C-alpha cells in the first residue's frame, strides 16, 4: 500500500510540475553567487541530500537545517540579491522555513520553493514554485516525490556543468583511490 501510494505521488508530481518554473529554478541556481538550501524537521534530509550533490558542482553551497528561528537567521544573515535559496516545506509547514524564505526574498535573493500546493505558505514567499506531492502515510511523511524533484534538479544542473563536474570527479577518483576511501567488491568493482 505504501509503495503504491508513493508511485501515485510520483505520477501526480510528474503531471503538476511546472517545467518553466523548473527551468527558471535551474537558471537561478546556475547564476547564483551562493546557494542556500533550507529544510527543517522531516524536510532536513531533502536539504542534506540536495546539498551533498550540489557541493560537487558549486563551491558555495550552504545547507541550513536549523529548526529554531534564531539559529536559522544566524545562518542566512549574509544572504544577498546575488544568491539563490531552495526551501522545502510540506504540511505541517515549518514557521522557521517560512520566515527564512520570506527574509531571503525581502533582501532580493531568488527563492525556489519545493512544496505540495500553490497555496502553501512557502509558495507565497517563493519566486519559483516546484510542486511535489507529499502525504502523511501512517506516521511518516512520504518524501519520495520531493526527493525525485531533487534528483531532477541535480541531473539538470549536472548537464549544464558537465565539464566542471567531470574535472571534479576525475580529481575525486584519484583521491578516493589514493586514500582508500571506498572498498571494492571481491570481483574488483
Image: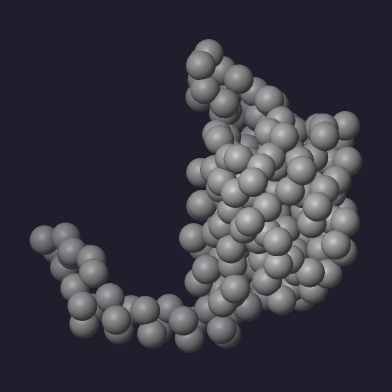
Comparing 23 with 85, the one in front is 85
What residue is drawn where x is 88% and y is 56%? 106
Residue 33 appearing in the image: yes
Where residue 32 appears, as percent x and y from the top left, is: 74, 73
Residue at 51% x, 44% y: name it: 45
Direction from residue 101 to residue 188 in the image, left or right = left
Residue 136: image x %, image y %?
60, 20
Instruction: Tell me which corner region of the image, top left, top right, bottom left or bottom right, holds residue 146.
Output: top right
Q: Is residue 87 left or right of residue 40?
A: right
**181 is higher (above) or lower (below) than 154:** below
Residue under the image location 88 percent in, 32 percent down: 119
Write the residue at 62% across / 58% down.
75
In the rendered image, the quadrant that contains the C terminus is bottom left
In this rendered view, identify the residue nearer to me: 143 or 9. Answer: 143
Q: Quadrant of residue 182?
A: bottom left
Residue 161 occupies quadrant: bottom right
From the top left corner, tell me how far across and down residue 150 is, in percent: 61, 51
Q: Position of residue 90 (x, y in %)?
A: 69, 32
Q: Measured along the vertical axis of the image, is residue 51 above or below residue 130?
A: below
In this view, 49 is above or below 91: below
Amino acid at each position: 500500500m505504501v509503495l503504491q501510494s508513493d508511485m501515485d505521488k510520483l505520477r501526480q508530481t510528474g503531471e503538476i510540475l511546472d517545467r518553466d518554473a523548473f527551468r527558471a529554478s535551474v537558471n537561478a541556481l546556475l547564476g547564483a553567487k551562493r546557494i542556500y538550501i533550507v529544510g527543517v524537521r522531516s524536510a532536513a534530509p531533502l536539504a542534506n541530500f540536495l546539498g551533498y550533490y550540489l557541493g560537487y558542482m558549486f563551491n558555495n553551497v550552504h545547507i541550513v537545517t536549523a529548526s529554531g528561528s534564531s539559529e536559522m537567521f544566524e545562518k542566512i544573515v549574509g544572504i544577498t540579491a546575488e544568491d539563490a535559496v531552495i526551501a522545502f516545506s510540506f504540511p505541517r509547514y515549518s514557521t522557521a522555513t517560512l520566515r527564512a524564505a520570506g527574509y531571503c526574498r525581502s533582501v532580493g535573493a531568488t527563492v525556489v520553493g519545493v512544496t505540495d500546493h500553490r497555496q502553501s505558505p512557502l509558495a507565497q514567499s517563493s519566486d519559483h514554485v516546484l510542486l511535489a506531492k507529499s502525504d502523511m502515510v501512517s506516521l511518516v511523511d512520504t518524501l519520495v516525490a520531493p526527493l525525485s524533484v531533487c534528483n531532477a534538479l541535480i541531473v539538470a544542473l549536472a548537464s549544464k556543468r558537465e565539464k566542471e563536474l567531470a574535472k571534479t570527479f576525475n580529481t575525486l577518483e584519484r583521491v578516493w583511490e589514493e586514500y582508500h576511501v571506498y572498498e571494492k567488491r571481491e570481483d574488483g568493482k
